[in-house]
Image (spheres, rainbow, N blue to C red):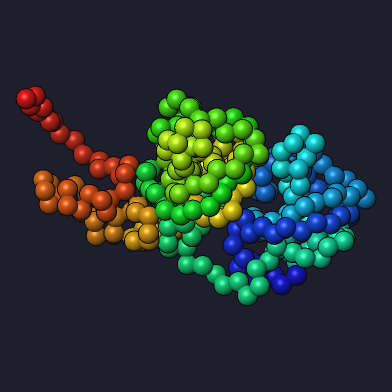
Amino acid sequence: MDVTAATNTPEMYTITASGTFTFDRNVGVRTSPFMAQSSAATYVAGESVNYDSKVKNDNHLWLSYIGASGNRVYVDYANIANNEYFGTDTNSTDPIQAGSEPTTGEGLGTLYGQEGANHADATPDGTTYTTTGNFTYTTNGAYGRETTLMDSQGIDHIVVNSTVPYTAKIKADNHYWLKYVSANDGKTYYVPYATIVDSTTGVLRYYGEDSNWGDPVYASGGSTSTGGGLPTPSDQENLGELTGAEGAAVANQTADGTVLDSQGHMVLSLT
């Protein structure tokens, strides 16, 4: 294994690769490729699994396939830090991007996986990453909504194995959302594609597979990447100093959901 290239390969880097892996130790089966998630089942030493893809994530390499439940599952087969494989493989291709260079992580959409989720708290709700791709849901029960709030009414049902072509990603309400136009009624909706902090596992949980990984979070403030989002550092430091038309003139540069901690009284005049 090229450990340097593996370490620098983007999280959730996925390749299509078929083969059979025979384990030399016990390994867990998980519904997402994160070591912190509890195992749903276990392969014991000597058992084999047939897979259809491989993923690099969370300092491990993973085998992936559709389980008996009909949902995609993941089994780690190598530890990158230790340069250690957990058995023998009929297909030696690993999900490592040749010549991968570290990314700065400063731009919106640069990070994904748990690394991105670790920075979600520093990204305001409403931050939008304008990008396109296709997200295929491997879980049932996702609903398109008119807002990016989980308690808003679910209107457009996204069933398991459905693919949603999206035009943007939004961070809001402890979730990542896709913006898309429904094939059912032609209306624009928002559907969650990941829970940033799952109440059961405490880690990020994706609801399927993305053709264009990259989440609507910043690793550091002050970016002006396409898609809008955080104000510049100087704007953030002076949040609340502008009023009237002067403030409205730069409103588009400030992310929806940006909060000014302040106290006062407002008198409403109804005309």
Question: Which residue occupies the foreground of this view, 122 or 130?
Answer: 130
Residue 133 x, y percent position in the rendering: 53, 52
x and y percentages locating residue 162 in the rendered image: 62, 39
Q: Residue at x 51, y 33 (%)?
A: 184
Q: Can residue 264 be seen by looking at this rendering?
A: yes
Q: Is residue 114 visible?
A: no
Above or below 71: residue 16: below
Residue found farthest to the right: 46
Image quadrant holding the N terminus, namely bottom right
- Label total for image: 0
Task: Decide which of 227, 150 is in the foreground and name it.
Answer: 227
Q: Is 184 left, or right, of 89 in this rendering?
A: left
Where does residue 124 sit, x and y in percent of width and height?
37, 46
Q: Give the image quarter of residue 223.
A: bottom left
Q: Is residue 225 left or right of residue 136?
A: left
Q: Residue at x 31, y 44 (%)?
A: 256
Residue at point 66%, 39% (across, down): 161
Foreground residue, 198 or 263? 198
The quarter of the picture where the C terminus appears is top left
Residue 244 x %, y %: 11, 45
Residue plotted at (76% across, 58% down): 17
Looking at the image, is 232 positioned above or below residue 104? Answer: above
